[in-house]
Image: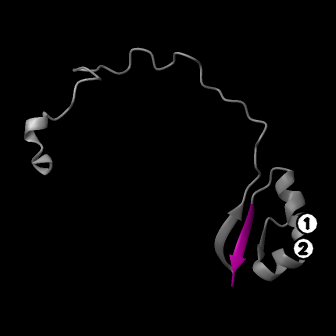
Amino acid sequence: MYMNKGNIVDIKNNLKYYLDLVSKGIKVTIMKRNVPIAVIIPFNSHKKNQTKLGCGKKTVNFLGSLTDELIPEDDWDMLK
Protein backbone atom coordinates (compact mmCIF):
# COMPACT_ATOMS: atom_id res chain seq x y z
CA MET A 1 0.00 0.00 0.00
CA TYR A 2 1.25 3.48 -0.81
CA MET A 3 0.97 6.65 1.23
CA ASN A 4 -0.15 9.74 -0.68
CA LYS A 5 0.56 12.23 2.10
CA GLY A 6 3.55 12.99 4.26
CA ASN A 7 5.04 15.57 6.58
CA ILE A 8 7.75 17.86 5.24
CA VAL A 9 10.64 15.86 6.76
CA ASP A 10 9.25 12.60 5.40
CA ILE A 11 8.77 14.12 1.93
CA LYS A 12 12.32 15.52 2.04
CA ASN A 13 13.86 12.21 3.11
CA ASN A 14 11.83 10.12 0.63
CA LEU A 15 11.43 12.53 -2.28
CA LYS A 16 12.08 9.87 -4.94
CA TYR A 17 9.31 7.66 -3.53
CA TYR A 18 6.78 10.51 -3.57
CA LEU A 19 7.83 11.70 -7.04
CA ASP A 20 7.35 8.14 -8.30
CA LEU A 21 3.78 8.26 -6.97
CA VAL A 22 3.18 11.58 -8.73
CA SER A 23 4.59 10.21 -11.98
CA LYS A 24 2.00 7.41 -11.75
CA GLY A 25 -0.79 10.00 -11.55
CA ILE A 26 -1.28 10.01 -7.77
CA LYS A 27 -1.68 13.35 -5.96
CA VAL A 28 0.61 13.76 -2.95
CA THR A 29 -0.38 16.00 -0.03
CA ILE A 30 2.40 17.77 1.89
CA MET A 31 1.63 18.19 5.58
CA LYS A 32 3.13 20.52 8.19
CA ARG A 33 2.50 19.19 11.70
CA ASN A 34 -0.26 16.99 10.22
CA VAL A 35 -2.01 19.96 8.61
CA PRO A 36 -2.21 19.93 4.78
CA ILE A 37 -0.31 22.87 3.23
CA ALA A 38 0.32 21.84 -0.40
CA VAL A 39 -0.44 19.26 -3.06
CA ILE A 40 1.93 17.87 -5.67
CA ILE A 41 0.06 16.93 -8.83
CA PRO A 42 1.26 15.32 -12.06
CA PHE A 43 2.14 17.59 -14.95
CA ASN A 44 0.29 16.60 -18.13
CA SER A 45 2.41 17.97 -20.95
CA HIS A 46 1.02 15.48 -23.47
CA LYS A 47 -2.53 16.88 -23.39
CA LYS A 48 -3.64 18.34 -26.68
CA ASN A 49 -5.62 21.53 -27.05
CA GLN A 50 -9.28 20.52 -27.46
CA THR A 51 -10.48 23.93 -28.73
CA LYS A 52 -12.02 23.80 -32.18
CA LEU A 53 -11.44 26.61 -34.63
CA GLY A 54 -14.54 28.80 -34.94
CA CYS A 55 -16.22 27.57 -31.74
CA GLY A 56 -16.88 31.17 -30.64
CA LYS A 57 -18.25 32.33 -33.97
CA LYS A 58 -21.19 34.76 -33.67
CA THR A 59 -20.95 34.93 -29.86
CA VAL A 60 -19.94 38.63 -29.63
CA ASN A 61 -21.85 41.63 -30.99
CA PHE A 62 -20.08 44.97 -31.37
CA LEU A 63 -22.49 47.88 -31.10
CA GLY A 64 -20.02 50.47 -32.40
CA SER A 65 -16.92 50.72 -34.48
CA LEU A 66 -13.73 49.16 -33.20
CA THR A 67 -11.64 51.95 -34.70
CA ASP A 68 -13.58 54.99 -33.43
CA GLU A 69 -12.39 56.64 -30.23
CA LEU A 70 -14.45 55.71 -27.18
CA ILE A 71 -14.31 59.14 -25.51
CA PRO A 72 -14.37 62.28 -27.67
CA GLU A 73 -11.15 64.28 -27.44
CA ASP A 74 -13.07 67.36 -26.20
CA ASP A 75 -14.11 65.43 -23.06
CA TRP A 76 -10.54 64.73 -21.95
CA ASP A 77 -9.80 67.19 -19.14
CA MET A 78 -6.22 66.02 -18.75
CA LEU A 79 -5.30 67.10 -22.28
CA LYS A 80 -6.06 70.78 -21.52
- Vertical placement of residue 64 versus 14, above or below: above
Label 1: state its secondary structure: helix
Viewed as shown, does residue 74 lie left or right of 1?
Answer: left
Q: Position of residue 75 (x, y in %)?
A: 8, 40
Q: Position of residue 10 (x, y in %)?
A: 84, 79
Local packing at callout 2 (Cα closer than 10 Å; few below 14, some 14-19, many 20+) is few
Instruction: Measure the alpha-carbon separation of dots 1 and 2.
Output: 5 Å
Viewed as shown, does residue 33 lie left or right of 17?
Answer: left
Range of residues picked out in magenta: 28-33
To which residue does mark 1 refer?
A: 17
Mark 1 residue type: Tyr
Between 70 and 47, the one nearer to me in the picture: 70
Mark 2 residue type: Asn
Label 2: state its secondary structure: loop
- Vertical placement of residue 58 versus 11, above or below: above
- Vertical placement of residue 18 versus 72, above or below: below
Residue found at x 52% / y 15%: 54
Q: Position of residue 57 (x, y in %)?
A: 44, 15
- Residue 48's image quarter? top right
Between 4 and 46, the one nearer to me in the picture: 46
Quadrant location, the N terminus: bottom right
Residue found at x 46% / y 20%: 56
To which residue does mark 2 refer?
A: 14
Viewed as shown, does residue 33 lie left or right of 73?
Answer: right
Q: Which residue is most to the front?
A: 80
Residue found at x 66% / y 68%: 38
Residue found at x 76% / y 43%: 44
- Vertical placement of residue 80 versus 72, above or below: below
Q: Are marks 1 and 2 in contact (CB under 8 Å)?
A: yes
Viewed as shown, does residue 65 lie left or right of 31?
Answer: left
